[in-house]
């Protein structure tokens, strides 16, 4: 009798776990239905754009010491500068090739976009910055 119980115990635990998971999933679905509808995250267009050879990605970053130092100076100024940039602005892509800097990624506002581009221009020079930053929420 004791052996039969030990053999069926794992089966009972499995069934109980499945029932608990089903109710948890149902709770999550009903909670989602009561909240305001959220737009699905869809980055398909950006992903296709980034796979094209015409768009620079961080993999295109030059390994020359001067370009690495240029990117490092801009990144350091973003992260530890006197202005409080948003987390999204601190995570933009800074790509340097032959002294030319490309800035890509989202920022929180038009003012932040202007400030980040200005900071990069102060480090790299006015004509050496390609500002491709996007205000968050705009494709």
Image: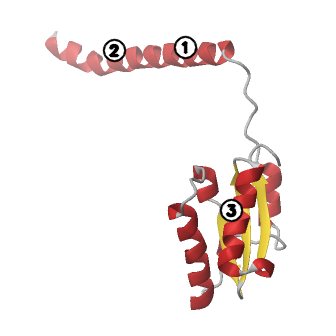
Q: Any mark on residue 116, and which? A: 3
Q: Position of residue 4 (x, y in %)?
A: 22, 14
Instruction: Determine the CA span between mark 3 and mark 2.
Output: 59 Å
Q: What residue appears at the point 72 percent right and 74 percent down from the top-left corner?
A: 121
Q: Earlier in the sequence, mark 1 or mark 2?
A: 2
Nearest to the eye among marks 1 and 3: give it. Answer: 3
Q: Earlier in the sequence, mark 3 or mark 2?
A: 2
Q: Is residue 90 above or below residue 128?
A: above
Q: Position of residue 79 (x, y in %)?
A: 53, 62
Q: Any mark on residue 12, and which? A: 2
Q: Quadrant of residue 123?
A: bottom right
Q: Is residue 117 above or below residue 97?
A: above
Q: Is residue 83 left or right of residue 43?
A: left
Nearest to the eye among marks 3 and 2: give it. Answer: 3
User: Is residue 65 visible in this depiction of the protein?
Assistant: yes
Q: What residue appears at the point 33 percent right and 18 percent down from the top-left corner?
A: 13
Instruction: Determine the CA span between mark 1 and mark 2.
Output: 23 Å
Q: Quadrant of residue 31?
A: top right
Instruction: Identify the residue position indicated by label 1 in the image.
Output: 27
Does the residue at mark 1 contact the one at mark 3 (Cβ under 8 Å)? no
As drawn, the residue found furthest toward the left would be 2
Q: State how many labels appear.
A: 3
Instruction: Determine the CA span between mark 1 and mark 3.
Output: 43 Å
Task: Describe the element under mark 3 as helix, strand or loop.
Answer: helix
Q: Position of residue 93 (x, y in %)?
A: 66, 65
Q: Quadrant of residue 102?
A: bottom right
Q: Earlier in the sequence, mark 1 or mark 3?
A: 1
Front residue of 117/11: it is: 117
Q: What residue appears at the point 50 percent right and 17 percent down from the top-left corner?
A: 24
Task: Describe the element under mark 1 as helix, strand or loop.
Answer: helix
């Amino acid at each position: 009798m004791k052996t039969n119980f030990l053999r069926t115990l794992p089966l009972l635990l499995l069934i109980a776990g499945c029932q608990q998971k089903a109710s948890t999933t149902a709770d999550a679905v009903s909670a989602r239905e009561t909240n305001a509808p959220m737009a699905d995250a869809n980055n398909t267009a950006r992903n296709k754009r980034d796979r094209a050879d015409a768009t620079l990605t961080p993999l295109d970053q030059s390994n020359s010491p001067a370009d690495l130092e240029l990117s490092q100076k801009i990144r350091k100024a973003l992260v530890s500068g006197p202005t409080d940039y948003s987390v999204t602005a601190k995570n933009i892509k800074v790509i340097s090739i032959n002294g030319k800097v490309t800035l890509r990624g989202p920022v929180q506002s038009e003012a932040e976009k202007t400030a980040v581009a200005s900071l990069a221009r102060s480090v790299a020079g006015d004509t050496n910055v390609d500002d491709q930053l996007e205000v968050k929420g705009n494709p």
